[in-house]
Image: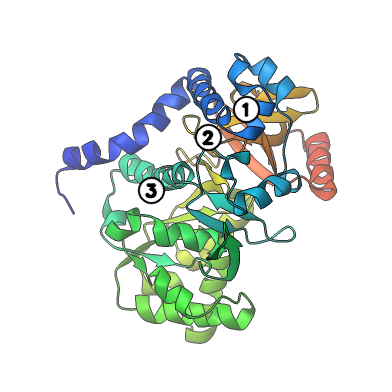
Amino acid sequence: MLSDETTISSILNPIISPWYESIKTPKKAQEQVFNKLLIDYAKTDFGKSCGASEIKDLESYQKNFPILDYKSLLPYLVKVREGDYQTILSEDPDYWVMTRGSTGNSKVLPATKTHLKQIFSCGARAIINYALRKKNFEVFTGDILNLNFPSAVHDMTVNGKKVTFGYSSGTYARLNPMFDRVSLVPRQEQIDALGSGIAKKQWEKRFELVYQTALEKKITATMGVVPVILSFARYVKRKYGKKPSDLWNFKALFCTSVPKIQFKYAPVLRKYFGSAPVIEMYTATEGVFAQQLDDLPYVTPNYDSYFFEVKTGKGIKMLHDLKRGEWGSLLISSCMFPRYNIGDLIESAGKQYFRVFGRRKVLTLLEHRLYRLFLGRLL
């Protein structure tokens, strides 16, 4: 660990400063991303069919490019697996990854070099921002609990060759160069060696491995899916009669993959992990889209990496143009897919703060509308 904070900041700033700049000028940042994406889309058969090379403004983009979801992507992904990646991608994918299937069947998606680079760089921002903001670099001096899903689960044929793939969280953890410098405990390869099942017994085997491997280590953080973090804490308490905060000195919890982290899960997490701050990240298999900027319980988008639209009750709006209280379905254009409806509902808290409050389901919409109707404020 370097002792000179100026030197540390100079190392970390290249990763974090583009995000800070994009928050100050989101319109400019989104225009830059938009123009870059159109160049990439023009290399694909799908983009050519939508006239990507002729599009100059947002209006024509929205008119010519349809909104996609996973179901509509499936015919193109079949062609990508057959070797025709340019049917919808501008790069040949390096890996394939799968979602947890928390809202249905698992989705299987490609991961290109550019996509992985964005996952790693944007994924590091939550940790770096926290360290710089708090001037607390201890999070880098210890190890991080690895509670990720296995990265080797199924085999499939891609362009005539057998390819093994697994859950995106484990795959990204295994490939992320940051974790060569900030150690994961246990290593992802050890997690994978226990098998691919995700039933209760398989998770308990993983939790026992994590516990035994980390027991004598200096653990300063954990990062991952909130329900798994909570399940691990309850396992340790049930089996060993101790809370994680009794065993390790956590500096922060970096929490992902479910809505309402600050409002629903943070109070429960504190019962097991003590006073360590809960840092929210809005991540998915498809990208790392936003992370918590400060102590306010909201996330702020990575405007320099992804292009964000929102389908509201009053039409399509740019995410950065939403006023406080406006909400709708998030549409994301990325290095892989244009205008992808990820299925999440997002609401503006003003000043580029947002919260993702659930999947687009009837019950979620009803709950949200009733809450707004009777209480008239943000959750």
**Picture quarter with the N terminus:** bottom left
Q: Residue furthest bottom?
A: 239
Which kind of residue does numbered mark 3 sit on? Ile
Do we see residue 236 in this rendering?
no
**Dot 3: few (<14), some (14–19), or many (≥20) neighbours within 10 Å?**
many
**Dot 2: few (<14), some (14–19), or many (≥20) neighbours within 10 Å?**
many
Kindly identify which residue carries mark 3.
127
- Residue 163 or 303: which is nearer the viewer? 163
SS category of the residue bearing label 1: helix
Q: Give the Cα separation between the discs numbered 2 and 3.
A: 15 Å
SS category of the residue bearing label 2: strand
**Dot 1: few (<14), some (14–19), or many (≥20) neighbours within 10 Å?**
many
Q: Is residue 314 shown left or right of residue 338?
A: right
Mark sitting earlier along the chain (1/3): 3
Mark sitting earlier along the chain (1/2): 2
| Residue appearing at x 69%, y 30% in the figure | 310
Q: Which mark is residue 301?
A: 2
Rendered image quadrant of residue 38: top right
Q: Is residue 185 shown left or right of residue 102?
A: left
- Residue 128 or 78: which is nearer the viewer? 78
- Residue 114 or 323: which is nearer the viewer? 114
**Picture quarter with the C terminus:** top right
Q: Are marks 1 and 2 in contact (CB under 8 Å)?
A: yes
Q: Is residue 243 shown left or right of residue 135?
A: right
Kindly identify which residue carries mark 1.
319
| Residue appearing at x 45%, y 38% in the figure | 294
